Amino acid sequence: MDVIELFPRLHLLRFPVGQAYLWHDDGELTLVDAGPPGSGAPIAEAVTALGMHPRDVRRIVLTHFHEDHAGGAAEFAVLSGAEVLVHRLDAPFVRGEAPGPQPVFEEWERPLHEQAVRLLPAGDVIRPREVTEVSDGDVLDLGGGARIVHVPGHTHGSIALHLPRHGVLFTGDTVAASPVDGAVMPGVFNLDRAQVLAACLRLAGLDPDVACFGHGAPVTAQAGRALRRSAHGWPA
Ligand SMILES: [Zn+2]
Ligand SMILES: [Zn+2]
């Protein structure tokens, strides 16, 4: 796992598949997404390397239930005591009460998905004992007030997390940056592509400076523009 400082308050954690972020408030941390299964211990090591203690991580906000984002949540919750938060529509899948719905694949997405699945560790995912369900408009006590933005489409319970005071937006997989050229586009492996485009527009309307994606390099200035372009759709 790679740890990259984006800003003094914001670190990117990069896994073989997917990414998570650590947000620093004074004396406490928030983890946004938790990587694939097996990520709990590496995240704890990263927190320690930053001079903090895993117990300083108060909460883990999951942008959606997919394994490359939620897979490490229970492991890290055990190590840190952090609360796990997820949208109520994705909560049953994070708790393991039911298998999450499979994406509606475009033909061109299938080989990409097979590739991603091969990079995920085999075996059962450890499930968090408790999750806190969140809804659109909820405000969390971090970053001077962080708003939950419900953006269904990638999954029914996908959320973005908006920190207006810092101009920072965590998009989850609703938006992604191309690993090839960094172009910002809607995410792949969705349940409803029309909803994803509407979500991109809604997120563009928040006009953040910084956008942190579930996959691909974050945009660290004038991110609202890049988000508006993403709402035009997937590259042909
Ligand atoms: Zn993902
Ligand atoms: Zn996803």
Image (cartoon, rainbow, N blue to C red):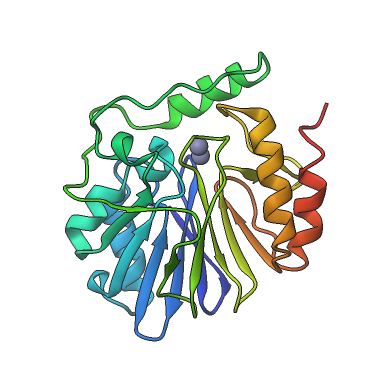
The furthest residue to the top: 107
- Give the residue displayed 35% in from the left and 72% down from the top: 49
Q: Nearer the viewer, residue 233 or 73?
A: 233
- Give the residue displayed 51% in from the left and 65% down from the top: 147
On the image, the x and y values in percent for residue 183 come to: 77, 45
In the drawing, does residue 47 fall left or right of residue 229?
left
On the image, the x and y values in percent for residue 39 come to: 32, 49
* Vertical comparison of 142 with 183: above or below: below
Residue 179 visible to the viewer = no
Residue 178, image quadrant: top right
- Give the residue displayed 44% in from the left and 24% down from the top: 118
On the image, the x and y values in percent for residue 137 come to: 50, 60
Q: Nearer the viewer, residue 93 or 116?
A: 93
In the drawing, does residue 87 fall left or right of residue 42?
right
For the C terminus, the image quarter is: top right
* Vertical comparison of 182 with 96: above or below: below
On the image, the x and y values in percent for residue 101 come to: 42, 23
